[in-house]
Amino acid sequence: MQTGMHTDTERCVRAVRSKDARFDGWFFTAVLTTGIYCRPSCPVVPPKPENMVFHPSAAACQQAGFRACKRCRPDTTPGSPEWNRRADLTARAMRLIADGLVDREGVPGLAARLGYSTRQIERQLLAELGAGPLALARAQRAQTARLLIETTALPMAQIAFAAGFSSLRTFNDTVREVFALTPSELRARAPERRTGTTPGALALRLPFRAPLNPDNLFGHLAATAVPGVEEWRDGAYRRTLRLPHGHGIVALAPRPDHIACRLTLTDLRDLTVAISRCRRLLDLDADPAAVDERLRVDPVLAPLVDKAPGRRVPRTADEAEFAVRAVLGQQVSTAAARTHAARLVTAHGVPVDDPEGGLTHLFPVPAALAALDPATLAMPRTRRTTFTTLVRHLADGSLDLSLAGDWADTRARLLALPGFGPWTADVIAMRALGDPDAFLPTDLGVRRAAKELGLPATPAALTARAAAWRPWRAYAVQYLWATDGHPINFLPV
């Protein structure tokens, strides 16, 4: 699979005829005779090839006047893996749009974050996705509206506001145009699984491309969970979320064909952002077929992939938080790192109320950590300096770990900080920035696995061998880590 697949008509037709779900999100099929658009895996009888045209995004289909299919619900497909794999302008723009930036700051805000003119961004997105940032954000608002209509008992006026629409009329018009149904008709057709009893509470299903191996994904998050901010409870990973308009608590649990997501938000306007961050946290827009196909080429990795395909990279819901935790975890055990982080949370985190009682705080923001007395940190002087320098740069904005950042530039800025070696920079690149090719040749677990598997022992030699795994070396790390008996590799019981 590759960028611009929608231009390869023959390949798209084959994918539609085979109803191959691996292609969902890569392109969309618009049917000229019916005026609807579908995902490639739509269960209906495929139309004749001459009646199909292909678009790179749901927004492009909507701009061309097509309505979403009521059977396959193409607006609910996993996002394109391209935006997680790439670090160019289009990919960074799409990550920010998914995070709701256009709704909060408009296209000028998007341009300012990316350092380009609005005209350049419009031109780039139109060329690659067939739609500009406003149309892409509108498609996302429509998807959020559908979600709220079908899963809550909220009044339509509240849904319009929560989904980011400027008026009830715009909300009604958009829903009718995109889904060929009024909001009330859309609600009437939905299964009876609404959550309206608790204000701000939602039960959602987060789709992914199969296969997905939950063991290392949830095992890692649970084993490294910071008390008060994260926990594993009743088969779900739970954590607090700091969001633009308030805060939230999410519970994420693996299911065979989706991730069950329970969200409690103080402000429903944060729904789109919360979903985006949960998807990034669990790496749900990854393309496991492409990843595993590349890694299977290596005869050493092939048995590991065949044994447990579909491993994801456990990421983060807060980039600055993860960077702080990476420094706290330098040269100490997982338990010690959790203890250090828990002390900071108790002393400097913002308290929150959890209906289930297990979570107590939001992780402290960099500004709060930059104001603390370094003498209170129970760590060696050199690591204390690393910590205080990091939080100061995060607080004053001279270090940007946001979705707008360039991976290579950010990694170079991290390496320029005192106490930041390749391991710390690359683990932040892997789990906070989302670089799928970040590699950890000096990591103890990676080196132990390499020795056991007969791979080169030195970091330089292992890096050279790992060139064949590019651009998916971060996923190779997950397979190497999984050879060990550490709790991070196992789904909690």
Image: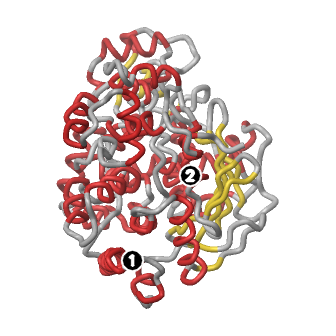
Q: Looking at the image, how many numbered discs can be counted on the residues?
A: 2
How busy is the neighbourhood of tag 1: few (under 14 within 10 Å), some, or many (20 plus)? few
Vertical relation: 98 (above or below) 28: below
Res. 62 visible in picture = no
Could you say where residue 38 lies in the image, as x and y percent from the top left? Answer: 49, 26
* Residue holding disc 2: 221
Query: Which circle marks residue 380 in the picture?
Result: 1
Image location of residue 139, percent across then percent down:
46, 46
Q: Is residue 439 visible?
A: yes
Question: Alpha carbon of mark 1 to alpha carbon of mark 2: how far?
Answer: 26 Å
User: In the image, residue 93 lies at what x, y percent?
Assistant: 31, 53
In the rendered structure, which amino acid carries the disc numbered 2?
Leu
The residue that appears at 30% across and 25% down in the rendered structure is 5
| Residue 245 versus residue 156 in the image, above or below | below
The mark that comes first in sequence, 1 or 2, is: 2
Residue at the spot x=44%, y=68% of the render? 328
SS state under label 2:
helix
